[in-house]
Image (cartoon, helix red, strand yellow):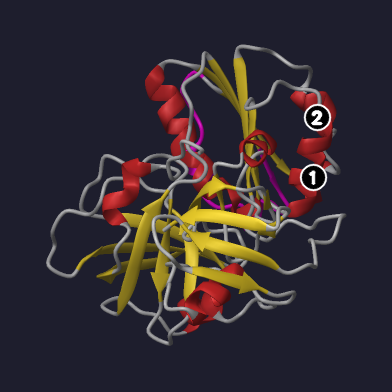
């Protein structure tokens, strides 16, 4: 039997949904809004750590995940930054065009799949709106007295939010708008592997794929990335049926091709809390007691996937004929 724990118990007290009110809404870059949220009763919000995100449950029923980009020491207010995504599912359009100060939204979380691990030195890479989880990490590194450097990439300086909050301190900041400076020689900027330095990156898929390629030979755990969109996989998922058993019960359910584990479990009365249904947000992380998952999420590192301690049943399947999980 595996010994497993769910990711990030530090924010577990915030896992239940609650209601927040919008207290401020302002433009901070082209097509980017800053949204500040407080509890309706003005009370204390759940604690969070750099890299954390929340579920924002909008009045129109859409739920979206946004990284917290304020001050973790501020116990009464959360800040998020929202990029308008015309090709998205409507969440950002609603926030930009409809949501106003005084309106209420639901809250899920906070959760952290991208936590900052202490190190002597940090390299941070942010692309576009990917600056949002990186900014609190930069401030934390500065507070820890660690060496750090930040590369902030964007299409145009007018689209790059929060640039006024990353200058100063002991770190080295490179702001690189492509419209002014052309392509960034990313491999040259990253340089070689340094065992004293951990790298954190967040941004568009192409940027993160480049980071992965450049750092492929680095030590496991020294590079962490966070994706806002689901990762693409070269190999298709296993398309065979398999069994899922709920540990400590007599519940076993068959999962057919084309059916998710969460849907199969729901059919026998087992509901797993979930949000994005794309393996991106981390809400449905579930302990694996026995068996080998076929990981299809965009959260776990290669080492975490190989450990088979947990999986995300909204998208992942099973390589073994039987998977035993704890819910």
Outermost residue on the front side: it is 250
Q: Dot 2: few (<14), some (14–19), or many (≥20) neighbours within 10 Å?
A: few
Nearest the camera: 203 or 323? 323
The location of residue 244, given as percent across then percent down, is: 57, 63
Give the vertical position of 274 relative to 297 (above or below): below
Q: Dot 1 lies on which element?
A: helix
Q: Position of residue 203 (x, y in %)?
A: 66, 49
Where is residue 195 shown, x and y percent of the image?
Answer: 65, 12
Where on the picture, by quarter, is residue 50? top left
At a point 80% along the width and 51% down the height, the residue shown is 206
Query: Left or right of 213: which side holds 108?
Result: left
Q: Is mark 2 on a helix, strand or loop?
A: loop
Q: Can residue 29 be seen in the rendering of this structure?
A: no
Relative height, residue 201 to residue 280 (above, below): above
Residue 234 is one of the magenta-drawn residues: no
- In front: 98, or 15? 15
Residue 287 location in percent, x, y? 48, 49
Please give the name of the residue rendered at 45% of the width and 43% of the height, measured from the top-left corner: 7
Q: Does the magenta stretch include residue 166?
A: yes
Instruction: Tell me the residue at 65%/72% (across/down).
Output: 255
The residue labelled by disc 1 is: 209
What stretch of residues is rendered in magenta?
152-170
Label drawn at residue 94: none
Nearer the observer, 223 or 256? 256
Q: Looking at the picture, does residue 307 appear above or below residue 259? A: above
Q: Mark 2 points at which residue?
A: 216
């Amino acid at each position: 039997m595996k010994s497993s724990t769910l990711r990030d118990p530090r924010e577990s007290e915030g896992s239940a949904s609650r209601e927040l009110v919008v207290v401020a809404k302002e433009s901070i870059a082209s097509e980017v809004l800053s949204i500040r949220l407080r509890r309706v009763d003005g009370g204390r919000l759940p604690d969070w750590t750099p890299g954390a995100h929340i579920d924002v449950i909008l009045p129109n029923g859409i739920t979206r995940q946004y990284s917290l980009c304020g001050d973790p020491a501020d116990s009464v207010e959360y800040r998020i930054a929202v990029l308008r995504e015309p090709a998205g599912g409507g969440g950002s359009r609603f926030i930009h065009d409809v949501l106003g100060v005084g309106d209420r939204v639901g809250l899920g979380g906070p959760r952290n799949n991208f936590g900052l691990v202490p190190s002597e030195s940090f390299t941070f890479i942010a692309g576009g709106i990917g600056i949002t989880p990186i900014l609190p990490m930069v401030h934390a590194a500065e507070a820890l007295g660690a060496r750090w450097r930040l590369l902030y990439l964007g299409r145009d300086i007018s689209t790059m939010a929060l640039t006024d909050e990353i200058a100063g301190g002991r770190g080295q900041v490179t702001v690189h708008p492509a419209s002014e400076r052309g392509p960034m020689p990313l491999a040259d900027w990253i340089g070689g592997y340094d065992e004293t330095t951990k790298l954190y990156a967040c941004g568009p898929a192409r940027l993160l794929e480049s980071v992965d390629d450049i750092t492929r030979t680095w030590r496991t755990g020294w590079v962490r990335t966070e994706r806002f969109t689901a990762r693409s996989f070269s190999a298709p998922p296993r398309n065979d049926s398999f069994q899922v058993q709920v540990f400590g019960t007599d519940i076993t359910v068959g999962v057919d091709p084309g059916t998710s584990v969460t849907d199969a479990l729901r059919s026998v009365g087992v509901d797993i809390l979930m949000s994005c249904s794309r393996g991106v947000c981390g809400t449905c992380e579930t302990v694996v007691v026995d068996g080998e998952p076929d990981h299809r999420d965009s959260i776990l590192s290669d080492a975490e996937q190989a450990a088979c301690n947990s999986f995300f049943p909204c998208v992942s399947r099973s390589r073994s004929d039987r998977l035993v999980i704890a819910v």
